Amino acid sequence: MSPGTEVSNDGRLRLVFLLLILAVLGAYAVIQRPWAGGGDGEDAVAAAANCPGTETPPLRTVDLKHLDRLRQEITAPAVFGADLHSYEEGFVGTAAAFSDQEPTMQPISTSDKGVEAGYEIRWWTPSRHDVVADVWLFEDAGAAGDFLDQATSTRCREEARETMAPRPDGGVDLEWRNPFGFMQQDLYLTRGPRVYRLAMVVPGAPEHPVSSVRHEGFKLANALGCELLGLPCGLHRKSPSRATAL
């Protein structure tokens, strides 16, 4: 994870903007993949290509209202405070699990039926933790489970280790050195056809594993997972589950 470009947090403006994108792209009924032209996206594909078993299941195609409901499921203020604001958010593909590529405001793939169901939000906390939340929607729970197995593999990552999360149940904790050179702690969760990633880079994170940093990163990532699912293992409060059936 690295700093990005700040975007608007006004949900209505965002939805209007996304609807305009979909209308223009849908009119031409074309498939667009922004990483094909090079730059950061090209690096992401290269990173994924070097990772064993990254022929990931396809994401479900949804309309933008459905995507906005998915977006509302991923949040961080419950753990870090109500004044937390995102510095970057947008569409994201499954390759981000391996490359940590930044989200884009251009859909990863579009058709006359909608857009691929992948979204990411990034925050800086007042304590300078870099926090990322992703949600990906697949066709069914089996495809989501297959992606979870691939995304939590240590074979294609540097300084990587994975273990079952102590909380919430079924979560997988993955620590790895991200492409920017910092140790990062990720929590992966599946709920039906959805996969969530809640990722943390602790301030001053080193290039190699340190137990105190690992403990802090996973404590916060796992607390975010509990808050997302409405479980009492979160740090601040119990809240209604945001992971609704889709």
Image (spheres, helix red, strand yellow):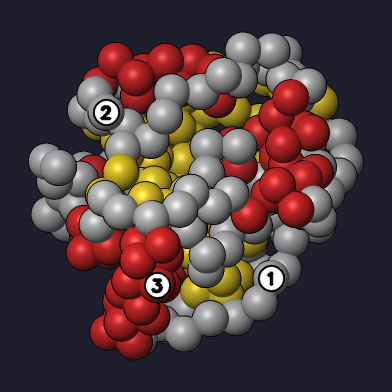
Q: Earlier in the sequence, mark 2 or mark 3?
A: 3
Q: Amino acid at mark 3?
A: Val
Say which of marks 1 and 3 sits in front: 3
The answer to whether residue 183 of the structure is visible from this angle is no
Residues at marks 2 and 1, CA–CA distance in whole angstroms? 30 Å
Provide the secondary structure element on which disc 1 rests: loop
Residue type, numbered disc 1: Gly
Characterize the local packing of mark 1: few (<14), some (14-19) or many (20 or more) Cα atoms within 10 angstroms.
few
The numbered mark, 2 or 1, whose residue comes first in the sequence reads 1
Residue in the picture at 72% in, 36% down: 45
The structure residue drawn at horizontal position 42% and vertical position 15%, both measured from the top left corner, is 146
Residue at image coords 70%, 29% = 48
Amino acid type at image mark 2: Glu
In the image: residue 153, left or right of residue 191: right
Question: According to the image, label 1 marks what residue?
Answer: 4
Q: Secondary structure at mark 2?
A: loop
**The disc label shown at residue 139, or none:** 2
Mark in the foreground, 2 or 3:
3
In the visual, does 236 lie left or right of 91? left
Lower sequence index among marks 1 and 3: 1
Q: CA distance from mark 2 to mark 3?
A: 25 Å
Residue closest to the eye, 230 or 196: 196
